[in-house]
Structures are given as C-alpha cells and as structure tokens.
Image (cartoon, grey):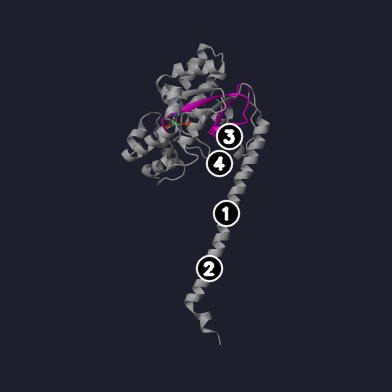
Amino acid sequence: MKSENIFDKNIEYNGYRKLHAIFFKIHKYINRFSQRAKSQADKFAFEQFKMKFGEREDDIYISTFPKSGTTLTQMILYQLTTDGNMDFDHIYDVSPWIRNSSFLGKEVPDLPSPRIIKTHDYYKYFQKQIKGKFIFVYRNGMDVAVSMFHQNKNYNNQNLKAEKYIDSFIKKNKKDWFNYTKGWLRNKNNFPILYLKYEDLLNNKEQEIRKIIEFCNLKPDEDAIKRALKYSSFESMKKHENKFGEQMQKAPEKVFNQFIRKGISGEGKVEFSEKQQSIFAKRFSETIKKLEGNIFN
Ligand code: A3P
C-alpha cells in the first residue's frame, strides 16, 4: 500500500515546486552565461574587425550619444570629402559604424581617406586610440531623451510610454547620458576633439561647417560647401530616409522610416514633467554643467 505521504497533494505539489525552482535557476544561470558569452564573442569579432580596418592619421570619428545629430554630421562630412554622389544604398556604406558592421558580420570596407567613422562608444573605450580626430556632437539631453523615446517606441515597443522612458533615462546608471557626455567633455587624454552643438547645426549650419573644415584640414571648394548645406538639410535627408534609417542587428533587412523624425530643439521641455526636469537639472549640475559651460560658453 502506498503511504499517505506519497498521495498528499500538498507535498507532491511542493516537490514539483522545488524542482521547478531548481531548474528555473539553472535556466536563468545558463541564460545569463550564454548572454555574457555572446557579448564576449561580439567583442572579439569587433576587435578583429578593427584590426583589419586599421587606423589612419586622417580618420575622422563622429562621436555622439545616440540621437544627437550623428547622421546629419555624417552627411555634412560625406559631402565635404567626396564628390557627393548620392548613389550609395546606405550612409553606412560610405561612413561606417564599424561596431555595428562587425555585429552584422559585414565585410571590412575599403574606403578612401579621410574616412568618416561613426561611433557611440564611451570615451574610455578610446584609451588606446592614437590616430585620427574626433568630432563630438552634443545635444540638449532632454531632447535626446525624447528622440530616444520615439526611436525605442518605433523600433522596439509600440506600447512604450514617454513618462516611463524618461524616468529610466534620468535614473542614475554608469552608462547613462550624463556619464557618457562627461567622459567626452572632460577629455582626460587630450584627444583632438571638435565640439559641436546639434542646436548650432540647426541654426547656424554654415558657420559649423566652416569649423569642421578648419579642424579636419579639409580643402573643399565652394560647391562642396553648398552641397553639404543642401544635402544635409532636414528636407533632403527626409526625402532620402531609406539611406539613413537604422539597420537593426536582429532584423538587418528592416529599414525604419521614423529615423529622420522632426529635427527640432525644445521637445524635452514639453515632454518632461516638472519633477523630471528638476531631477535632470540636479544630475546635470552634478556631472557636466561646468564642463559644458567651459566648452561652449
Ligand atoms: P529627432 O528624433 O528629435 O527628430 P542621430 O543621427 O544621432 O541618431 O540623431 C537623430 C536625430 O537627428 C533625430 O532627431 C533626427 O530627426 C535628427 N536629424 C536627422 N537628420 C537631420 C537633419 N538633416 N537636420 C536636423 N535634424 C536631423
């Protein structure tokens, strides 16, 4: 005869629950390990890609926190350094984002000098960087948050709410906008960096283009400057949006059509609640206010 215990429903249930808990822990551990292993694999693939890509004295890195005017600046530099042919399929073919290219398993591109390279990497990542120059494009952080929110909503999660996204944007995190920007503005290693403001690119583009020309020691003729102005206009880039939209790692065939979205400044002030604005202001003054003032005022 079977013991009462064996048929005790509660005990039976508890047993399964324990086994479930154990195997769920194993599953979570393996998952975490697998994610770490994938990110290490990606890292080594990128290192290999970079080795092949090499470094040149006249490389120009456009360094930005995402949604700060990277693509606009890529377009300006592409026009200034080439004959401006718009026949390319995607801006990455002529101005690569090499970290993304390596993740997507693309070929190392063979590009004429000067190469215009996009990066969203943290400053400290470039400790060993010795060749090339940097153009750092800075945009009002609250506007960056709104632009990021729209990109995330459009690409990843249609149900995403602005309030929730903004809360996560201003929450302290080693990799947040404040820390990212602080590293680049502080420029501990004295890299040659030209600092531009997205807002100045909107309002005074020709002046900013001339700064770029001088800093990068370029010799464009006046036609190239006119072309840079024309093809980097919001209207022109919107018209050619399929050449600029982000290419996703998970769905590289997809090109989204909200990448060239509004191209204005001041949305942050509208979308951030008063409380969010005050948290932003506090974090801003704790991290980058002084550095920002020294560079741009
Ligand atoms: P919004 O989402 O606020 O409109 P990045 O290239 O770094 O991802 O930045 C994207 C932001 O720059 C988007 O901001 C996009 O609309 C804006 N942008 C892209 N091309 C532009 C242009 N030619 N002029 C002004 N803004 C532009």
- Left or right, 230 with reference to 277: right
Residue placed under numbered mark 1 in the picture: 31
Residue 125 bears which disc, if any?
A: 3
Residue 224 visible: yes
Q: Nearer the viewer, mark 4 or mark 1?
A: 1
* Cα distance between the residues tagged 3 and 1: 27 Å
Q: Is 141 drawn above or below residue 251 in the view shown?
A: above
- Find the magenta span and give its range: 112-141
Asked if the magenta segment contains residue 123, the reply would be yes
Instruction: Check disc 2: other Cα within 10 Å, few if <14, some if 14-19, many if 20+.
Output: few
Image spot of residue 207 (x, y percent):
45, 16
Tell me which numbered mark, 4 or 2, is placed earlier along the sequence: 2
Instruction: Check disc 1: other Cα within 10 Å, few if <14, some if 14-19, many if 20+.
Output: few
Residue that sits furthest to the top in the current view: 222
Tell me which numbered mark, 2 or 1, is placed earlier along the sequence: 2
Q: Nearer the viewer, mark 3 or mark 4?
A: 3
Q: Secondary structure at mark 2?
A: helix
Tell which of 178 and 38 is nearer to you.
178
The image quadrant of residue 158 is top left
* Cα distance between the residues tagged 3 and 4: 21 Å
Tell me which numbered mark, 4 or 1, is placed earlier along the sequence: 1
Residue placed under numbered mark 2 in the picture: 18
Tell which of 33 and 93 is nearer to you.
33
* Cα distance between the residues tagged 3 and 2: 44 Å
Amino acid carrying label 4: it is Gln
The quadrant of the image that shows the N terminus is: bottom right
Tell me which numbered mark, 3 or 4, is placed earlier along the sequence: 3
Q: Is 26 drawn above or below residue 270 in the view shown?
A: below
Q: Residue at x 53, y 68 (%)?
A: 18
Q: Mark 4 near ligand 1 (CB under 8 Å)?
A: no
Residue 65 visible: no
Tell me which numbered mark, 3 or 1, is placed earlier along the sequence: 1
